[in-house]
């Protein structure tokens, strides 16, 4: 790539060619207000008209997000005409936007509001007819409110490009245009996997998780034993809600906050991850010794479960029957834990804090219940926990570091922690499967081929003379590639890990937003590095744990000895395994009559 | 609505016609509209599977162009031009009159399945504004008083 000279406000700069004005300006120290563009052109419809600038020689103002620089180009950001035009663009967007900022949960992290502030948008400049809006809160995971949509198209691109699905699209035309699933259906009535990746890119509150804070309040009010568990990925990102640098581990403060919020017990979903590993590794060994056709595929990610049920039901026999870790913890709390403490299990409310929106759907599946009682009652996202802590008045910076409650199921291994990052489940499973097969421990413990953020990773390992092949993938586009191999009988893997979101749970749809406009102290390339930074938190915590193998977690050993019996016992099956829906209709009600 | 096998085969055949085109969607939709009569979601799902294009994309295109229809069209499709020239010459009144006499809004079909009423953008007949077309036949300089006669013409045709 060659270098070229450009001018901004008549000052010369030398930058790489091939950039847009917006990108080049950022390198030169100008953040031109913008809304619809995302990650240097991953979405760039130039639809919002907020980034207009003047270019010498052009008759009209140009959108800087789509206009390429050329040698000698003269750009004027503060040209009076451009300043007014940017303000007008935002005022026009506001004229067709919900006026309920004060009750919008996106307030504080709304890019539209921030840009309106920056360009100096004035209230009520344009009053008139507004587009008829649509509101969908039927799905357990996601809410769509087109009254807040600015038609930027980021969610459409995210669903199509990162997940390869394409649930959302523009509908109708002109003034009536809105974004939604086909036929303006609810997310519940289309093959949406509810992963929530769309919520991570929405600049406003048009797409958000379905909040369950009310349900939690009710459980407290009813005087239930409200027991909380937190997924590994939450500790790697919760700090971001309180201004911590991305990549800060906040395990201790998070636990302290949960104690102060009044939970009866604070547990770690990592215990469930350890339990998943012992069950799943055992299941894997059963499968290979009984020569069932491979590969076996992991089942911890509910977005992924939705995907395979909707799009590849014929491959469901490949799925592990293990419940996801938080469901396992819920089932154990409402059986083993309740019995040991003599608590009526109907009086327990299990709350899971997850980096995930699809978990909200997962917890309601009838397959994830024991004797008619759901394993988990409430699922909150990392973002909702942030909201809960802010609501309580707790001052984040004054929180001490505290430990999870050491009460029957409080311990966890380093293997459990790395579940939150793509490849982690596989690495944890290999540590334990190796032990079950050989009765020895795998050395070195860190199995690095599982690490890294590539969409598809491969690894192989020789155990007792037999070579096993593994694959790990994240994001449904990548999963699809492997599923097609299985379908065509060209798949060489024995065991496949699939995570619904690109990078794994650390980049889940319920994690804090990464909008550069609100992160002035992060690096310029933060949108490309934050996943790795969060992953590092989990790998560090794994290194710091004394016990790093799931099968050596003392609470797991006791649980099997005192209660479950062996790995894969009938009792373990009843509590810890689930089943899948082979007949899930993509568009329910469409094929009636 | 469950599609009949013949319908499914027909739509797959249309998709097959344009499989090698760089951008086959418009061509396929256009033929499906012509040959099947309308493009409901069930049909879009088949096209989606055949062409590997998300349903939401197809739905977006179908709802963007007024030429495509999500519901069956009547035997006679009355297109009233409300492009600029026709509008100035009273196209909107013509449209309203049809709407009043047929008791349907633009975009709807009469209960007997005989007529569908559409407002069209310019049909390129500005010199004879206001113009309408019924199943391709163009009527020039339509006066409000002519409209009952025009409707009757097609009702009579149906009686024969």
Image (cartoon, coloured by chain):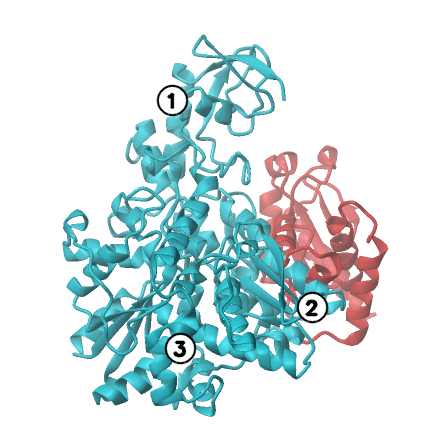
> Mark 2 sits on what residue?
B113
Compare residues A465 and A121 and report the one nearer the observer: A465
Compare residues A221 and B142 and report the one nearer the observer: A221
Compare residues B74 and A391 and report the one nearer the observer: A391
Q: Is residue A387 left or right of residue B49?
A: left
Residue found at x 48% / y 82%: A577
Please tell me the colour of chain B. red
Q: Is residue A159 left or right of residue A84?
A: right
Q: Is residue A130 left or right of residue B128?
A: left
> Mark 3 sits on what residue?
A328
Q: Is residue A132 above or below residue A81?
A: below
- Tag 1: Cα neighbours inside 10 Å, few (<14), some, or many (≥20)? some
Label 1 close to label 3 by CB (< 8 Å):
no
Residue A392 screen position, x and y as percent: 16, 58
Label 3 close to label 2 by CB (< 8 Å):
no
- Tag 2: Cα neighbours inside 10 Å, few (<14), some, or many (≥20)? few
Q: Is residue B32 above or below residue A515?
A: below
> Mark 1 sits on what residue?
A84
Residue A294 screen position, x and y as percent: 67, 73
């Amino acid at each position: 790539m060659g270098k070229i000279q450009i001018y901004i406000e008549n000052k010369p700069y030398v930058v790489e060619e091939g950039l847009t004005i917006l990108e080049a300006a950022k390198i030169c120290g100008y953040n031109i207000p913008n809304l619809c563009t995302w990650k240097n052109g991953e979405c760039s419809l130039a639809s919002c008209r907020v980034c207009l600038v003047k270019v010498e020689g052009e008759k009209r103002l140009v959108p800087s997000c789509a206009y390429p620089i050329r040698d000698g180009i003269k750009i004027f950001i503060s040209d009076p005409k451009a300043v007014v035009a940017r303000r007008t663009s935002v005022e026009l967007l506001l004229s067709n936007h919900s006026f309920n900022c004060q009750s919008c949960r996106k307030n504080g992290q709304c890019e539209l509001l921030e840009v309106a502030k920056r360009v100096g948008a004035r209230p009520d400049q344009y009053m008139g007819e507004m587009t008829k809006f649509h509101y969908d809160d039927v799905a357990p995971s996601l809410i769509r409110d087109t009254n807040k949509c600015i038609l930027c198209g980021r969610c459409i691109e995210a669903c199509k490009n990162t997940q390869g699905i394409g649930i959302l699209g523009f509908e109708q035309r002109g003034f009536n245009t809105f974004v939604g699933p086909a036929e303006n259906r609810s997310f519940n009535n289309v093959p949406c996997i509810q992963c929530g990746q769309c919520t991570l890119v929405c600049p406003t509150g048009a797409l958000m998780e379905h909040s369950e804070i009310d349900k939690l309040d009710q459980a407290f009010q009813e005087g239930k034993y409200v027991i909380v568990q937190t997924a590994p990925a939450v500790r790697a990102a919760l700090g971001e809600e309180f201004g911590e640098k991305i990549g800060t581990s906040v395990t201790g403060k998070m636990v302290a906050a949960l104690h102060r919020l009044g939970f009866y017990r604070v547990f770690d979903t990592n215990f469930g991850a350890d339990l998943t590993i012992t069950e799943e590794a055992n299941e894997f060994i059963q499968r290979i010794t009984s020569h069932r056709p491979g590969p076996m595929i992991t089942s911890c990610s509910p977005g992924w479960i939705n995907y395979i049920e909707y799009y590849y039901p014929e491959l469901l026999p490949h799925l592990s029957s293990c419940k996801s870790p938080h469901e396992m913890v819920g089932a154990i709390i409402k059986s083993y834990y309740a019995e040991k403490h003599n608590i009526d299990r109907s009086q327990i409310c299990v709350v899971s804090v997850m980096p995930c929106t699809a978990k909200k759907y997962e917890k309601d599946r009838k397959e994830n219940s024991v004797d008619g009682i759901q394993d988990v009652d409430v699922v909150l996202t990392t973002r909702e926990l942030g909201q809960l802590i802010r609501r309580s008045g707790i001052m984040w910076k004054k929180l001490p570091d505290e430990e999870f409650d050491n009460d029957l199921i409080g311990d966890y291994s380093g293997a459990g922690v790395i579940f939150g990052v793509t490849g982690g489940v596989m690495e944890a499973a290999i540590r334990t499967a190796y032990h079950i097969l050989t009765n020895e421990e795998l050395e070195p413990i860190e199995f690095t081929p599982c690490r890294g953020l590539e969409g598809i990773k491969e690894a192989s390992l020789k155990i007792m003379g037999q070579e096993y092949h593994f694959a790990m993938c994240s994001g449904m586009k990548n999963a699809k590639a492997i599923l097609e191999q299985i379908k065509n009988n060209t798949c060489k893997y024995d065991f496949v890990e699939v995570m619904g979101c690109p990078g794994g749970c650390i980049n889940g749809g319920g994690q804090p937003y990464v909008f550069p406009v609100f992160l002035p102290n992060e690096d310029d390339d933060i949108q490309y590095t934050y996943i790795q930074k969060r992953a590092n938190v989990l790998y560090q915590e794994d290194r710091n744990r004394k016990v790093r193998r799931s099968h050596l977690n003392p609470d797991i050993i006791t649980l099997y000895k005192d209660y479950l019996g062996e790995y894969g016992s009938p009792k373990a099956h009843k509590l810890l395994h689930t089943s899948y829906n082979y007949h899930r209709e993509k568009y329910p009600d469409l094929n009636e009559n | 609505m469950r599609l009949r096998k013949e319908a499914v085969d027909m739509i797959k055949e249309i998709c097959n016609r344009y499989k090698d085109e760089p951008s086959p969607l418009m061509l396929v939709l256009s033929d499906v509209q012509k040959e099947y009569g309308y493009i409901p979601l069930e049909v879009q799902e088949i096209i989606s599977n055949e062409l590997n294009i998300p349903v939401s994309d197809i739905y977006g295109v179908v709802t963007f162009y007024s030429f495509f229809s999500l519901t069956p069209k009547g035997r006679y499709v009355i297109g009233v031009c409300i492009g600029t020239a026709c509008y100035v010459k009273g196209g909107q009144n013509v449209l309203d009159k049809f709407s009043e006499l047929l008791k349907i809004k633009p975009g709807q079909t009469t209960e007997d399945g005989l007529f569908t009423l559409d407002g069209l953008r310019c049909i390129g007949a500005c010199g004879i504004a206001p113009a309408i077309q019924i199943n391709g036949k163009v009527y020039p300089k339509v006066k409000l008083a002519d409209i009952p006669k025009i409707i009757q013409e097609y009702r009579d045709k149906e009686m024969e």
